[in-house]
Amino acid sequence: MDLPRLISTVDVPPKFLKSAMLVGRIPLKALHTDPRVSYTLYIPPEHLNPDPSLQAKHTQDMELDPVYQLPPLPLLVTIHGTGRNAETCRDRLIDLAHHSRVAILAPLFSAGIDSYNDLHSYKLLKYKSMRSDVMLLQMLDEVALRWPGIETEKVFMMGFSGGGQFVQRVMYLYAERLRAVSVGAPGMVTMLDEGLKWPNGVKDLDEVFGEKAIIEKEVLRKLPVQLVVGSEDNVVHGGEEFWDWLQEKKKEFAREKGNSSEEKRGAGGLRVGRLDTLKALQLAWQEEGITSSLEVVEGVGHDSGGVLEVVKAFLEPYIRSV
């Protein structure tokens, strides 16, 4: 990727990293290759090696600061839901960053990029001119350049609600880039069904993402996966009346534009509770030999904070093992 010269942790003495805003809470940064989206990080200062290349240059005759002897810092990517609370997603994991030695990356996929009323396109990975999966990979490239002490080739990933949809679909396309994932309470999922088109199934995967888009089922079978949802999170989002209204409104807009195919398609989506959705996904995966742990948190509704400790308990052993 062709990026301009940027200041990285290699250029800054360790005592100035905080003043340069290269550790701790990192301000939201526009993605260089597509400034329509941005990202923020939390980097625990005590765990970051600013310049891992110094280890290779180290000899017995030179004294090396202990900070330059730290191993690469693993990365946990947390994906926001429809509300776009990326900074909250980041801040909820600060304790994990310090205790378990991991950096946090929280992308922000703005609403209304390709359609004024759009809230959901990032969850689908591809929509008109938006490729949110590619944007995520480009974010990882930028992180690798600015913070060479962070491991970006293989990452941990978690997401809740709309973020759970994003994570589940990224799993299919980029399983080789993931160490472990948590899929939290998605309202809609993609089945490994070659009879259904994306995003319901994978029939037209090559048409949507190109000929190189392949689902590596053998890799998925080895990937640690958590499905997590509250026990009370089994009502249809918005209720049946909302979906009836939305479907009619979308048909109305489609008729105004003269788009008959859009009118037939209607509102789309699945009128199924999130608990039932994840149970069905787990069973479908089992038929493909893909294992996952389904965690149902008692007494919790559609609340990312209510399942957070369960998610951290799942990811923490894998993070520590790195």
Image (cartoon, rainbow, N blue to C red):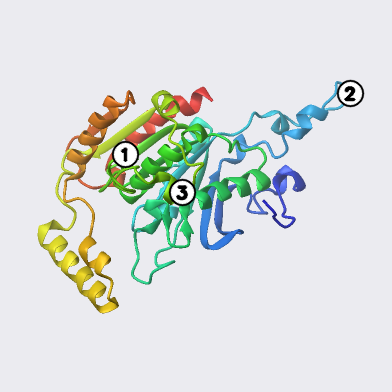
Report if the CB atoms under discs 3 and 1 are less than 8 Å apart. Answer: no
Picture coordinates of residue 284, whole percent (x, y)? 25, 31
Circle number at residue 209 = 3
Of mark 2 and mark 1, the one earlier in the sequence is: 2
Which amino acid type corresponds to the residue marked 2 in the rendered image?
Asp
Q: In this rendering, does residue 61 appear at all?
A: yes
Of mark 3 and mark 1, the one earlier in the sequence is: 1
Report if the CB atoms under discs 2 and 1 are less than 8 Å apart. Answer: no
What residue lies at 60% left-to-right and 58% top-to-bottom? 33
Picture coordinates of residue 221, whole percent (x, y)? 39, 25
Vertical placement of residue 107 versus 319, above or below: below
Q: In this rendering, does residue 91 appear at all?
A: no
Picture coordinates of residue 54, whole percent (x, y)? 78, 33
- Residue under label 2, please give it: 61
Of mark 3 and mark 2, the one earlier in the sequence is: 2
The 10 Å Cα crowd at callout 3, few under 14, some 14 to 19, many 20 or more, is some
Q: Secondary structure at mark 2?
A: loop
Which amino acid type corresponds to the residue marked 3 in the rendered image?
Phe
| Separation of marks 2 and 1 at Cα, in angstroms | 62 Å
Circle number at residue 98 = none
- Tag nearer the camera, 3 or 2: 3
What residue lies at 34% left-to-right and 43% top-to-bottom? 203
Which amino acid type corresponds to the residue marked 1 in the rendered image?
Glu
